[in-house]
Amino acid sequence: MPSSRNTAFQYKSSKWIILCVFGCLISAPSLAETSGTREPDPSEIFAPLLLPDAPTVYRSGDGTPGPMAWKNQADYRIHVQILPEKHLLSGQEEVRYQNNSPSTLPVLWVQLDQNIYKPDSRAAFASQWHFPDHTSGMTIKNITVSDLKGKKQPVQFQISDTRLQIVLPEALKPHSKIRLQINWDYTVPGPWGGRTAVSQSRNGEIYEIAQFYPRMAVFDDIRGWDTLPYLGDEFYLDYGNIDYDVTVPDNFIVAASGALLNPQAVLSPLERARLQAARLSEKRVLIRTQSDAENAAHHASTKTRTWHFLMQNTRDVAFVTSPALLWDAARLDLPPISPAPGYPVEARLAMSVYPIEAAGPQAWDRSTEYVKHTIEYFSHEWYMYPWPNAVNVGGHGAAMEYPGIVFDGMKDRDAKLFWITTHELGHSWFPMIVGSNERRNGFMDEGFNTFIDALASLHFNKGEFAPKHDGEYAPDTGKPADDIVKILMDPVYDPIITPSHLGSKGDRHAIPYFKTAYGLELLRSQILGPERFDRAFRHYIEVWAYRHPTPSDFFRLMNSDAGEDLSWFWRGWYFRTWFPDYAIEDVKYTSDAKLKITILNKGWLPLPLTVLEKWTDGTTTSVRIPTEVWSSGNRHTLEIPSSRSIAAVIIDPDHAIPDVNRSNNEFFATGRPTQ
């Protein structure tokens, strides 16, 4: 008889094989389905959908956190210094890690993202990111742990690519805390560093600093420690409070995530007065002018200043520092908040920092206007922005987001600047507030964010930059139903649900950004309607704020809140690469004065459709056909009582759905059709 340990192993192995096979079945469409050579099978289209993650006591069947849901917390106290002459960042941190899980943790895992730049990193071989130069990565000088009484002791640790494993001298029990002390340094990569870089401007170097400190990996109820290596993709982080200092030459300014707690120590009286004026102003106020930046750039600095920031309930922080930056700000029309415990409430700020060459009436002079709109609009529509400030940085142009601050391009202008500002700051909601696992499920942040961005474009300044049509969404014409067709028909693309870390094929924006976002728009405008969709979507954000939802959680919540079994839609749009395709088969009159219109369903994703009738007397009527019609077959006949003569019949006249072949969507009568 096998031991209980072997039995458990066999069970887990069998379960893994079943899930693997299931995953292959739901994610690998057949060539016949995607090419349209196999007739749609209603029994497959409308079959029950088994989602990847089953409900548990931690995640409920209605898509909300379960009664025993938990999340671990990581609080940081960080000190860093930039040495410009060496492009070196050195730091010390204390991490206060709280294990709220039911598991005992013998080891801790920490993320060292700067190791991606080492010549022998996994990313140097396996990533789509290609760096012309390399650094030596993050040098860990020492690590100690201490208990709550402050007793310190060194620990064993092992670095594996971009991950660091700490072997604890005593396992961390459930509902207990530990403190880690880590000292490190690294060379800041040049402009080729992408998301974290030092680049040149007319008046000096700009340091865009992110992923700059050892960050705790996530331990969750899905996988335990989630330790995928960093290959240049996105992130997965726990929440906590981050209290940090940045020491730089005294002619530099620092703009950063969270609230500046020591303005008296780092800003002049004039700058502080301007900052206070900005808290009262709907229009931007220049805190640091062109002459200020030019004077700073030509000042030979021999001293340093330390800027002190705090960001509460956040998963990360980032900052920019340079002598070359202009700085403007305006009030956010949101409820004022306290920047830190014990501080009085104050108005929150939309801010922009950028070099002189970025300024201009259709360039970065309008950045803060775009920041204000983004934060205020999304706060009103979806969920209140929680942090003191929102900063847009005009620098190297990484187009990258972090809580409270985003890195955009100093050369961005006009619609591009509006769209990129809205998108990067839109990430404040996905994944900064709703903390999905970007590294595995990138569509849950990129696509959800792109969806709300498209609505923001319609809202801003009476549609000044509408519709959104950039590299992320409807790039060809701005009409998503038409622009998506070539993606739906191209076999190079995998289903949306394909794990992000496996690498993408084709245009990297096509699936996680465009197709995902348009799927939500179809759900909102064509399937549920805005009222039902918006209420459910807001609920999803509310219950998963500062938590870690999976795709299964989202699908379940939308089903439950919207009152629909959307299995057919999730399967076709997210788990498969199916698409709609309708055709008019026949139009004729019957002897009892009825117009009969026969519609064929030729696609595997039968979205609701509108059939428009144009009559010879100039009037029009329309019929809405729900998806359920196609559960019993692929042919449906409309019977419309009418004594009028038909002039034309058109399927989906407004191009509201992505019908992949519109050549058979119209019928034009040369005369009254005969029986």
Image (spheres, grey):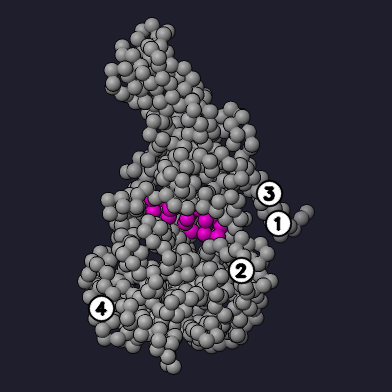
The answer to whether the residue labelled 3 contacts the one labelled 1, judged by CB atoms less than 8 Å apart, is no
Looking at the rendered structure, the secondary structure element under dot 4 is helix
Q: What stretch is highlighted in magenta?
A: 436-455
Residue type, mark 3 in image: Ile
Please name whichever residue, 42 or 304, is drawn nearer the observer in this view of the structure.
304
Comparing marks 1 and 4, which lies closer to the viewer?
Answer: 4
- The Cα–Cα distance between marks 3 and 2, rounded to whole angstroms, is 38 Å
Label 3 to label 1: alpha-carbon separation? 12 Å
Could you tell me which secondary element the residue under label 1 belongs to?
Answer: helix
Above or below, 541 relative to 132: above
Q: How crowded is mark 4: few (under 14 residues within 10 Å), some or many (20 or more)?
A: some
Q: Label 1 is placed on what type of residue?
A: Phe
Residue at numbered disc 1: 9
Nearest to N terminus: mark 3 or mark 2: 3
Circle 3 Cα neighbour tier, 10 Å, few/some/many (<14 / 14–19 / ≥20):
few
Q: Name the residue under label 4.
A: 274
Query: In the displayed structure, does residue 167 sit left or right of residue 298?
Result: right
Tell me the CA gap for discs 3 and 4: 63 Å
Query: Which residue: 33% across, 82% down?
Result: 292
Contact? badges 1 and 4 (CB < 8 Å): no
Of labels 2 and 1, earlier in sequence is 1
Task: Name the quarter where the N terminus is drawn.
Answer: bottom right
Q: What element carries label 2?
A: loop
Sooner in the amino-acid sequence: mark 3 or mark 4: 3
